[in-house]
């Protein structure tokens, strides 16, 4: 099983050819602005490091997350950038949960880690939506993707705050 997970991770990291030599560049921690530049209007495909679950998600400029996760098509997925963290919110209503990760990248490969340096997700960035991810049904992200009730510096699961209209 562990060999299968390692194989999937390696495959995810080499599956997308790069137009530059980004894979040779040094991995570095990203600021909020650098996360926005790299991930918004981009697709990240990769795997969860412990479970081996594959994912491929497009981060729409609207704040929606479109794509597939280990649990199937993403529905009610939203993203937000909070300081140096990329936050993801999945589920509807009382079921909605949000978690945030620090982002490290070389411009092509990306690693999502917790504040205690646990690597949770790894992937490869592709600009745009080359895999044609779409929404299984319509949803919104509360008007603005930045309105999550995520306590600064905490990386546990939270419930989002309702947007004030």
Image: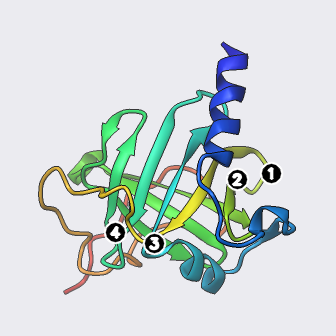
Q: Secondary structure under badge 1?
A: loop
31 and 133: which one is in front?
133
Which residue is at 16% across, 62% downward? 139
Residue 129, above or below 35: above
Return the mark for residue 117. 1
Measured Cα–Cα span from mark 2 to mark 1: 5 Å
Measured Cα–Cα span from mark 3 to mark 2: 16 Å
Tell me the quarter of the picture where residue 120 sits.
top right
Return the mark for residue 142. none
Mark 3 burial class by Cα count in 10 Å: few <14, some 14-19, many 20+:
many
Which residue is at 85% across, 64% downward? 24
- Relative image position of residue 159 (x, y in whole percent): 38, 56
Q: Assign the N terminus to one quadrant of the image.
A: top right
Query: Dots 2 and 1: beta carbons under 8 Å?
Result: yes
Instruction: Compare marks 3 and 1 and give the one earlier in the sequence.
Output: 3
Query: Dots 4 and 2: beta carbons under 8 Å?
Result: no
Task: Identify residue for label 3.
Answer: 80
Q: Secondary structure under badge 4?
A: loop
Task: Identify residue for label 2.
Answer: 114
Measured Cα–Cα span from mark 4 to mark 2: 22 Å
Query: Dots 3 and 2: beta carbons under 8 Å?
Result: no
Task: Identify residue for label 4.
Answer: 161
């Amino acid at each position: 099983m562990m060999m299968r997970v390692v194989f999937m991770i390696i495959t995810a990291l080499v599956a997308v050819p790069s137009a530059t030599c980004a894979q040779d560049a040094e991995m570095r921690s990203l600021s909020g602005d650098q996360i926005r530049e790299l991930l918004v209007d981009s697709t990240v495909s990769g795997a969860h490091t412990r479970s081996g679950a594959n994912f491929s998600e497009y981060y729409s400029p609207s704040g929606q997350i479109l794509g597939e996760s280990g649990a199937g098509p993403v529905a009610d997925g939203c993203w937000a950038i909070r300081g140096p963290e990329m936050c993801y919110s999945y589920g509807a209503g009382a079921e909605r949960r949000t978690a945030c990760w620090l982002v490290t990248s070389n411009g092509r490969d990306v690693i999502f880690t917790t504040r205690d340096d646990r690597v949770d997700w790894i992937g490869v960035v592709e600009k745009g939506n080359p895999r044609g991810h779409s929404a299984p049904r319509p949803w919104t992200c509360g008007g603005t993707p930045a309105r999550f009730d995520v306590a600064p510096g905490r990386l546990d699961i939270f419930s989002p705050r309702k947007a004030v209209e």
